[in-house]
Image (cartoon, coloured by chain):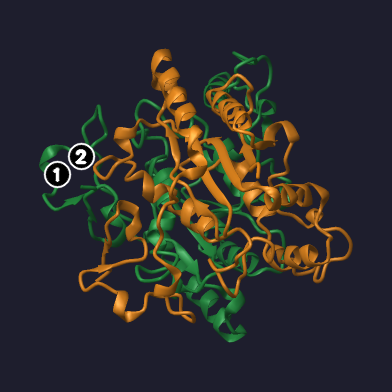
Chain colours: A green, B orange
Amino acid sequence: MAKKVLIVYAHQSSRSFNAAAKNIAVEVLTAQGCTVEVSDLYAMGFKATATAEDIKGDLKDAENFCYLDESKLAWEQGRLSDDITKEQSKLTEADLVIFQFPMYWFSVPGILKGWFDRVLTNGFAFSQEKPYILQTFKDKKAMLSFTTGSPESMFCTIGINGDINVTLWPLQNGILHYCGFQVLPPEVFWAPALTAAADRKKMLARWRTRLQDLLEEEPLSFTPLDRFDKETFQLKDEHISEEFGLSVGIHLSNPLPSQS
Amino acid sequence: MAKKVLIVYAHQSSRSFNAAAKNIAVEVLTAQGCTVEVSDLYAMGFKATATAEDIKGDLKDAENFCYLDESKLAWEQGRLSDDITKEQSKLTEADLVIFQFPMYWFSVPGILKGWFDRVLTNGFAFSQEKPYILQTFKDKKAMLSFTTGSPESMFCTIGINGDINVTLWPLQNGILHYCGFQVLPPEVFWAPALTAAADRKKMLARWRTRLQDLLEEEPLSFTPLDRFDKETFQLKDEHISEEFGLSVGIHLSNPLPSQS
């Protein structure tokens, strides 16, 4: 079966490094027989703010508007705005989702944050009662592919920005793993703006090579869900190491020191 | 001297818990003699996307648009859009900035991410060449005040979400400390939607109490800048512990294990 790929792409310019990375992904994956769809957020003028306008028809409680509740109800009743519904359809179809963006302020640009806020609707992408457990996306892979402003040397345990995996935790764990995706290792393009043209080409060549076998890659490992208590979502006693807390230990393939 | 406070507020509803928290801050700080300004992002219809429309007049390189460079130049030449300039003026005036928002996807809502992306302009809020070092905001305090969807028990070292300080690292270190603010400890309202009305009132009462002395609070401590090499922004050898890397160690008042 031909695989379906969705690239959610957030750069303003078609001549940017991010555009080049996106174009290479389209080219290589298409050549492999994949069907590739691109959501070009700036070109689409994608709405980045979660508002009542995302819901068609009457609100449940307009006076005390709660996006989490209203969008869940609208999703259940098919009353989400067309732009959200369209992105959700693409997501439902996809076997692999690549988020291609320049890192802005240690995270995704506002327009992509808006995509997460609006498209990953309560009920559709996650269950409040059963976080991390909804099976909707369990057969899908997702990954971050991004450029940084800072060089790699600043994003390590002795660098002033801290380890890149800490910075990626809210995105990779908090969004992708939370929604049940298999999370592929990120593709980090370190500071292309500070890099010589020849080396930028090498970065893109490495990406091209990686894309050949991307769909066969092993996802990142997260602490298995069955190690957590089903009520408290805390590690069961038998899995708590004496020295360390465990849950975010996967950052560095090492556990974190305990809080005490 | 009366202090000036800016509250950057991101909730859609004036009857929300976040609105209540914002209103209490306005009330208590005003009663103390502070001048309080609120940027009510949804009410303002604040633009959340960083685009060429943020720049008046000609672009330096429209074909290969780079927001970081174009916005820096526009800031230097007074050609940023009026909505950005207005927010920058408020920021320049403020002694304290409170960001009041519901946590969306382990971070700020898209509309507030857009505020960071657009208002904290290259040159105005930070120097690419001298990250963390620009003195512009050094006498200003800033803090996050937010509601969560998950209870506190999920946001600790043995909780499935991991320690809240890891989730806050990109915001508190990557944005606020990077721009040179003194970062006050966050005010976290744990899962008010899952909390009984009486306990929600207690949360707000505690916030009211805290606000009395907020301006006198000690900021969070980050690894002092002089411990990092000025070229590489890595810890100097004499500050690297044998067992642990240090830079993100402030998460838990403990260093992180090394990568090896």
Query: Marks 2 and 1: CB-CB under 8 Å?
Result: yes
> In what element is the residue under mark 2?
loop
Amino acid on which the number 2 mark rests in the picture: Leu
| Circle 2 residues within 10 Å: few <14, some 14–19, many ≥20 | many
On the picture, is A129 further left or further right than A62?
A: left
Q: Is residue A16 above or below residue A128?
A: below
Q: Is residue B205 above or below residue A119?
A: above
Measure how far apart labels 2 and 1 are at the Cα level: 6 Å
| Circle 1 residues within 10 Å: few <14, some 14–19, many ≥20 | some
Residue A257, quarter of the rendered image: bottom left
Residue B225, quarter of the rendered image: bottom left
Q: Tell me, for residue A239, which label it has, or none.
A: 1
Which chain does the numbered disc 1 sit on? A
Q: Tell me, for residue A235, which label it has, or none.
A: 2
Q: Residue at x 38, y 69 (%)?
A: A156
Q: In the rendering, at what x and y percent does residue A92 appear?
A: 51, 38
Q: In the rendering, at what x and y percent does residue A102 appear?
A: 59, 61
On the picture, is A73 further left or further right than A59?
A: left
Amino acid on which the number 1 mark rests in the picture: His
Question: Is residue A190 visible from the viewing direction of this image?
Answer: yes
On the picture, is B183 further left or further right than B79?
A: left
Residue A164, quarter of the rendered image: bottom left
> In what element is the residue under mark 1?
helix
Which chain does the numbered disc 2 sit on? A
Q: In the rendering, at what x and y percent does residue A2 appear?
A: 49, 52
Q: Which quarter of the image is occupied by the C terminus of chain B?
A: bottom left
Q: Is residue A222 above or below residue B138?
A: above
